Image (cartoon, helix red, strand yellow):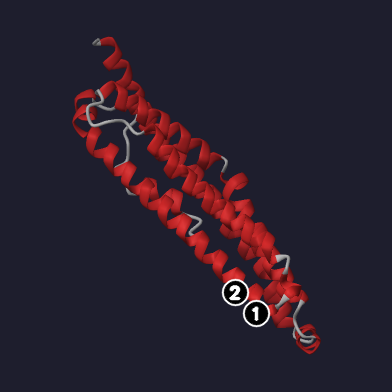
Amino acid sequence: MNLNDYESIWKRQELPVGANADLTALRETFETKRRKMAGTLFVRDIVEASAGVLVSAVFAYVWWHIGRGGWPLVFAIALVLGVSGFFARERFRVRRVRLGTNATLLAKTEGDLAELRHQRRLLLNLWSWYLLPIAAAMVIVFVTVVRLLPAEFVAALRKSPAAIAWILAYFALILPLVFGGAWWLNRRAVHTQIDPRIAELEKLHADLLSSQ
C-alpha cells in the first residue's frame, strides 16, 4: 500500500490558479479536469483496496505457516481489511452521488466542490483512518513473528549488535520518517492543489449563480 498515493493524485492535476483564475478558462477546462480527477480517484480506490486484500492474504499465509501461536495476526488482517473496506466504501459513495450526463454546469460544479471538500477532510485526517491502522498492523505482525522465533535464533540475534541496531533504527527512525513524510506530503497537496481548486470552483459557482 503506497502511503503517498493521495499526494501523487493531485500532482497529476494541472496546478490550479486559485481565486484569480479566469472564468472563461474555468468553464472551458471544467469538464476535462472533472473527468481526470474522477478517473484518478477511481484508480486510487481500486488499487488501494486490492493492495489491502493482497497484504491480508500474505498475513494469513504467515499465520497458517507459524501455526496457532500466530493468532494475533487476525487483528493485523482486520486492520488492513478495514482500510481496504474504506476504499471500497468510497466507490459506493461515488456511485450514489454520481450525476447524470444531462446535469447542469451548476450542479456539476457543486458536486465537484463537495467531492474536493470530502477529499480534503480525508487527507487532513490521514493518520486516523489510514496511517495508524497500517502502522498498528505492522507492529502486530512484527511482535507476533519475533515472539515465535526459535530460542536459538533469538539468542544469536542478541549477540549481534548490528542486527539489534538495525531493528531499532527501522522502528525508531525509518518508519516514523516514512509515515511522517506521507502525512506531510498529503497536507502539502491540500494546500497547493486542493484548496486552490476549491477556490476556483467557488468562483465559478458564484458566477453561475449570479447569471441565473
What residue do we see at 44% from left, 53% from top?
Answer: 5
Residue at x 57% of width, y 50% of height: 130
Type of amino acid under label 2? Tyr
Amino acid on which disc 1 is placed? His
Q: Position of residue 175 (x, y in %)?
A: 62, 62
Q: CA distance from mark 1 to mark 2?
A: 6 Å
Q: Give the position of the C terminus as an image quadrant.
A: top left
Say whether residue 72 is visible.
yes
Q: From the viewer's side, name the closer residue of 135 and 23.
A: 135
Q: Residue 101 in the image: x percent, y percent?
A: 23, 31
Q: Position of residue 132 (x, y in %)?
A: 64, 52
What residue would you read off at disc 1? 65
| Closer to us: 111 or 167 | 111
Quick one: label 1, few (<14), some, or many (20+) residues within 10 Å?
A: few
Displayed quadrant of residue 61: bottom right
Q: Which residue: 56% across, 71% down? A: 58
Query: Crowding near pointer 2: few (<14 within 10 Å), some, many (20+)?
Result: few
Residue 84, given in percent of the width and then of the height, sits at 52, 53
Helix, strand or loop at label 1? It is: helix
| Relative vertical location of residue 83 with respect to residue 139 in this rendering, above or below | above
Front in this rendered view, residue 32 or 26: 32
Asked whether the beta carbons under mark 1 and mark 2 sit within 8 Å of each other, the answer is yes
Q: Is residue 157 above or below residue 36?
A: below
- Give the numbered dot on residue 61: 2
